[in-house]
Image: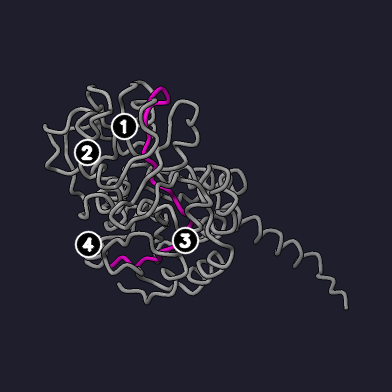
Amino acid sequence: MILNFPKPLGALICSVAVLGQVALAGGVVKIDGSSTVYPITEGAAEDFQKETGTRVTVGISGTGGGFKKFARGETDVQNASRPILQSEMDAAKQSGIEYLELPIAYDALTVVVNAKNDWVDSIQVSELKKIWEPAAQGKILKWNQIRPEWPDKAIKLYGAGSDSGTFDYFTEAINQKSKDSRGDYTASEDDNVLVQGVEGDKYALGYMGFAYYVAHQKRLKALAVEWDEKKKPATKPSEEAVLQGVYNPLSRPLFLYVNVKSLEKPEVKSFVEFYLKHVETLAQEVKYIPLPAAAYVRVKARFEKKECGTAFAGHGDMAVPIGEILDRPLTK
């Protein structure tokens, strides 16, 4: 049966559709947080703005800095390269902020050296700890202090700033305590600063998100990481290694956190829907590692049902499969 609306009703339907698009275009979606997640979110923001005319702002104050704003209700969406911490959960609860925790992709934290470095191709987790632990400050200053056969040259260190989720994850994975690190290195929440530093110094060593390494791999060299304590062989970061669960302990999931109240705004709800629809492709475009297709189905269901809380109970876990993360009960 064909239904023919009278002309006035057809005009009304058209007007409502136009008004809805205008309302969407007039809104603003506010995002901040991780510089690691930034390339994916920036890609989604650009495409969404082109399609809808909605303004989307994406800051990069680091995961920790972003969570401070998110917990005050200043942003709608939080990019995070680690799970929300207990102190951040408490701050959000105090402000009445409920949130969705949405895993979106995998990252492989990558240990890099200058492309001209010809003396090291792999490094042990215990050696990384020797370089980066707090006790190393002012003491472990040269390459040959790590292995005698390495050069008698100063190591120039580059790493994430203290507001970065990359910093939190790396320090917990390597030093067994989040935020436990030497302080005498060049630190930044912006991975591009770290890239430039390592590119410019033959004796540099640093760590950063996998996508930033891939974008500059002609001028950087990624090291294979040997988890000697667990008797795991040296493995280079790659999509295959992460999905097979063999690049450890430096593989990690990445997240979006969404303020549930912000979803009452049509522009925010539409943006998150758009993001989840396209995130697999966007992650591949910026050289991150997409989740398995079945995991994205479950993440979308979590969003649609508005299942609030975190699967991590306020602390980070090393090398947890995405299926286990999505099976866990959520806590607020």
* Image quarter of the C terminus: bottom left
Q: Does the magenta stretch include residue 97?
A: yes
Q: Quadrant of residue 112?
A: top left
Q: Position of residue 8 (x, y in %)?
A: 76, 65
Residue of label 1:
205
Is 21 in front, or is 80?
80
Q: What residue type is labelled 3?
A: Lys
State the separation of the CA atoms marked 3 and 1.
45 Å
Q: What residue type is labelled 2?
A: Ile
Q: Do the residues labelled 1 and 2 touch (CB within 8 Å)?
A: yes
Query: Which label sits in the foreground, 3 or 4?
Result: 4
Q: Does the magenta stretch include residue 161?
A: no
Is 121 in front, or is 107?
121
Q: Residue at x 34, y 32 (%)?
A: 194
Q: Tell me, for residue 265, which label it has, or none.
A: 3
State the separation of the CA atoms marked 1 and 2.
10 Å
State the separation of the CA atoms marked 3 and 4.
23 Å
* Classed neighbour count for the residue bearing mark 2: other residues with Cα under 10 Å, few (<14), some (14–19), many (≥20): many
Which span is picked out in magenta? 96-117
* Classed neighbour count for the residue bearing mark 3: other residues with Cα under 10 Å, few (<14), some (14–19), many (≥20): some
State the separation of the CA atoms marked 1 and 4.
35 Å
